[in-house]
Image (tube, helix red, strand yellow):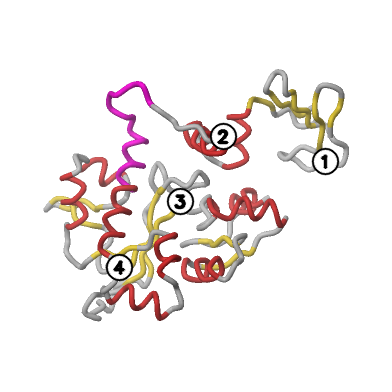
Amino acid sequence: NRAGVNHKGRCPFHNEKTPSFVVSPDRGTYHCFGCGVGGDIFSFVQEMEGVDFKGALKILAEKAGVEIVYEKKGERDATDRLFAANEEAARFFEKNLTEEHPARAYLTKRGLTDETIKSFRLGWVSEEWRTLTTHLRDKKFTDKEIEAAGLAKRTEKGLYDRFRSRIMFPLSDPAGRIVGFSARIFAEKGEVPADAPKYLNSPETPLYNKSRLLYGYDRAKHNIRKLNFSVLVEGQMDLISVHQAGWGNAVAVSGTALTHQHLTLLM
């Protein structure tokens, strides 16, 4: 509520009954006299959304309708390169999932529409050992970057793809940037190794922490705020089906039990 030239309300960073959170429109800052937190719009979005500064910048630019243009044309930093590698991998997987592919028929049989498959950027990767690695090398990504992004494993014989013979589900951070993948086994010819796990997730990387990430949160967060509750499910297919059915406030845990960090993000 307005309080003179400022706005005052209950703090979103700690539980309180008496409002002590003050926003100054003139200064473009906030401060809580209860828990001591404070900052500007960028630090606020970083804390609320669980993203870094560039993630906050991306969210705010989209909200304001501003296109981000980078003036420095030099090498992007290491983190940007990992985001770019994951984005390129997602495009590669998407391209593989053609309308005639058996994996697409499987997803359609599970009730997913073409629009939903496209919206969630689902894909597929073959059983070949180095198709993605070769593609990323052609796109000028180094072996070190490919491995650091969790897209390949290193052996004495060099790199090989972490994901093979699988339907690919991109995992995004709160800003919508792809940070990793969850992959369901699906051999093109129906030949699945007996020891292959049904689902395989990206390993922990500088971008991906499974204890902090909720699948679908990037697209559900606004609906959660609007409806003031969330629907929590387990697994990618459940999440996508629930969203397709109209419940856009659903999120899913992926490859881990529900954690304190997950709950904090939802709160």
How far separated are the C-alphas under marks 4 and 3?
18 Å
Q: Is residue 203 magenta?
A: no
Position of 84 with respect to 238 (left or right) is left
Q: Which residue is mark 4?
A: 166
How far separated are the C-alphas under marks 4 and 1?
47 Å
Q: Which residue is mark 1?
A: 16
| Frontmost residue, 153 versus 126 | 126
Q: Nearer the viewer, mark 2 or mark 4?
A: 2
> Nearer the N terminus, badge 1 or badge 3?
1
> Nearer the N terminus, badge 3 or badge 2?
2
Q: Where residue 55 sits in the image (x, y, percent)?
A: 49, 37
Seen at 21% across and 55% down, the residue is 132
Instruction: Point out the residue furthest to the front here.
Output: 65
Q: Which residue is mark 2?
A: 64
Residue type of the residue flagged with mark 2: Ala
Position of 155 with respect to 173 (left or right) is left
